[in-house]
Image (cartoon, rainbow, N blue to C red):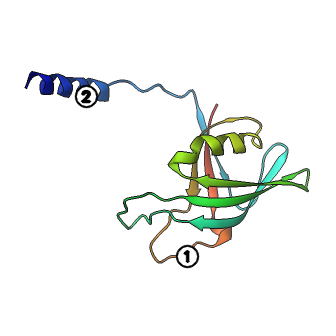
Amino acid sequence: MKQIIIIGVLLFLVGCAKKPLLESVSANSINNNTRTDKYEIIISKVISDSRCPVDVNCVWAGEVELMLSIYKENVFYTEELITVSYKNTLENKSILEKYTSNKKIKSIEVLPEKKQGVEIKLQDYSLKIDYIE
């Protein structure tokens, strides 16, 4: 019984711990066609979108696999395949930071949210990128 009380108190204290504050955060959306300082990033293809629709309860959140076409000075430079999910965050950050003037990325989100029975067209997809400045 004593151990259960101690564990409960520890969990309560951990939940009350302060989270560090970010100095500042800015958001940038990569719609189908977005320019950075040197690069233009285009979502050229949605390979798959298995995200859980917002109006459905799912066991797994799902993921979105996107092909990005990268242009440098209006000339095709390369393609990057990214899979946006909770488990690929670090990999996606390192890929995208190469084309965003090495700004540090806090989070990456695919918009719009998926809704059951509603098809999302390629031109409606965008990446919401939050930067740490």
At x 77%, y 43%, the residue is 99
Could you tell me the amino acid type at mark 2?
A: Leu
The one nearer the camera, 99 or 7, is 7
- Lower position in the chain sequence, tag 2 or tag 1: 2
Residue at the disc numbered 1: 119
| Residue 34 appears left or right of 85 | right
What is the distance, in whole Å, between disc 2 and disc 1 at their CAs?
A: 43 Å
Q: Residues within 10 Å of mark 1 (few under 14, many from 20)?
A: few
Compared to residue 38, the image places residue 68 above or below, namely: below
Q: Residue reaching furthest left?
A: 1
Q: Residues within 10 Å of mark 2 (few under 14, many from 20)?
A: few
Q: Is residue 107 visible?
A: no
Q: Position of residue 104 (x, y in %)?
A: 66, 34
Residue at the disc numbered 2: 11
Q: Quadrant of the C terminus?
A: top right
| Residue 12 appears left or right of 126 | left
Q: Which of the 4 image quarters holds residue 11? A: top left
Compared to residue 54, the image places residue 2 above or below, namely: above
At x 44%, y 57%, the residue is 61
